[in-house]
Image (tube, rainbow, N blue to C red):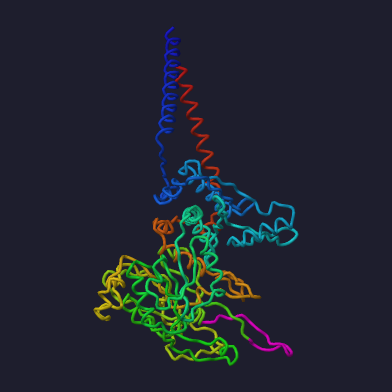
Amino acid sequence: MVKQEKKINLRSRALTQLVLLTGIVLMLNFIGSIWFTRIDLTGDKRFTLSEQSRKIVGNLKDVVYIKVYLEGDFSPGFTRLKESTREMLDELRTYSKGNLEYEFIDPAANTDETERDKLYAQLYQKGIQPTTLEERTAEGVNRKYIWPGAIISFSNQELGVQLLKDQIGLQPEVMLNNSIQNLEYEIVNGISKVTNPLQPAIAFISGHGELNEMQTADISMTLKNSYVVERLAIDGKLGALDKYKAVIIAKPDSAFNEKDKFILDQYIMKGGKVVWLLDQMQVSMDSLSGKGETMALARQLNLDDMLFRYGVRLNYDLVQDIVSALIPVVTGTIGNTPKQQLMPWYYFPLMNPYSKHPIVNNLNAVRAQFISTMDTIAVQGVEKSVLLTSSRYSRISTAPARVSLGIMEFKPDPSMFPQSFLLTGVLMEGEFTSNFKNRIPPVIAQDTAIGFKEKSKKTAMVVVSDGDIIRNDIAKGNPVPLGVDKYTGATYGNKAFMQNVMDYLCDDSGLMVVRNKEFRLRLLDPAILDESKLTLQVVNTVVPVSLILLFGIVKMYLRRRRYAA
């Protein structure tokens, strides 16, 4: 009788616990339906969206549709990128109030070769670069194209986003991890651009021998996805630049007169942003190709005094770097045919950004041509951030400098390149002092129609001592994508660098800070993995299963003892 009552009490207690647990679960679900929150327990907060991202997707007025071309049978690394992209989109959709939808597409799934190639061409035109995977099979090596990108659509607007960020010299695991770090920025920035009807206006300055429309066609086409892009000659017209958010001065070859300098200066004082891409040295590639050598001479642009007042001095020299791009060089003849070989050309350095600044964080190497060094000048109220430098093994040649192809005949000796991380690109932010302060007559300084300002609003400018980083090659009368090496086919980070520069200077939302998000990559030591492969497999498979079985046996034994009483 006592045993029977005890069993009834235990059954009643279990039933009461079940009812309470069910009630608690239902209550938590009800609270969750009216009060939304998410808890990220990861150490690097990889599932926590920035405030800027939540604001942008939370303010969507209509549905944004995203097609992600990362479906298919991938290697583990690309599978990780695919799943991370899916998780990021799910997280963004949660905050979008139903205004974000997506699908994953396998671009190789179409059996119609013509239609498949047509899709490939569309993806390429949208700026998505393919990646080739090689798989070894019994029949040989099977090459497979992957298009790691997405097309973001809103209303009648479309924008391509590259999800995989190539970085020369990095291990694939690190490169994929860096790409995953940038997913939030790339996707949200794309959404912001495609949904923003009010595009800022930017201008390429002309009239001083700057790069022409064809030479900047590729970057102009890319920037037109986000900005109204125009070309403008200042021509001494006051207020000529006032409507532009930023202006680009790309490789002028003749001097600026004082009136154009004054207009540029006052544009900066009113808060305008400037990208200075300047060649301090004049080098003739035609002479170099024909004779094998030439002289590099100083180029006088009449801008040194302005830049010095703002906080930087461009030097009249050339950087030589062991880490450099390849060019074809005649090394002999086969019969009557010249034999060419690709060799590193020290005057075309590859600048791997070492800075963690949002403009260059996780950026691929930027290819330069005859770039100079620069020095920063201490200016009160102006902060500088290093963007680009040479490598650890570099040196300089001061003007006038003899440039010869003959230096490639000898194997590079690191001891002959003793200088490291020479500054070639800088961001300056703050309140600048006018270059014309105390230099113009009172009648001009006090003229209300001119509105002369001695001190700027808080603004920013980027200075790079090479104009060719924005110049695309031209093949058969058409522009080659910026950053694509015509000799090797390698894609450098020039286009991404210029996009990031413009986005940073014109960004009012603060979204660029998301590019500093960092995920710690926890890789197994390959040496330890090879030595202890079997042990690690046992520890990670057999031991957990054994512990669960042991726990179950102990639990069952204790339960039998309890109810046997």
Where residue 211 appears, x then y in whole percent? 51, 77
From this viewpoint, which residue is outermost toward the top? 1
Quadrant for the N terminus in the image: top left
Write the residue at 42% across / 66% down.
244
* Closest to the observer, 420 or 269: 269
Res. 200 image quadrant: bottom left
Q: How many marks?
A: 0
Where residue 333 appears, x then y in whole percent? 69, 89
| Residue 511 painted magenta | no
Which secondary structure dominates the residues rendered in magenta? Answer: strand
Q: Is residue 544 left or right of residue 334?
A: left
* Closest to the observer, 479 or 105: 479
* Closest to the observer, 365 or 413: 365
Residue 304, above or below 552? below
Residue 335, above or below 468? below
Where residue 130 appears, x then y in whole percent? 62, 61
Q: Is residue 235 visible?
A: yes
Q: Is residue 466 left or right of residue 114?
A: left
| Residue 341 painted magenta | yes
Q: Which range is magenta?
A: 330-346
Q: Is residue 391 visible?
A: no
* Closest to the observer, 550 or 208: 208
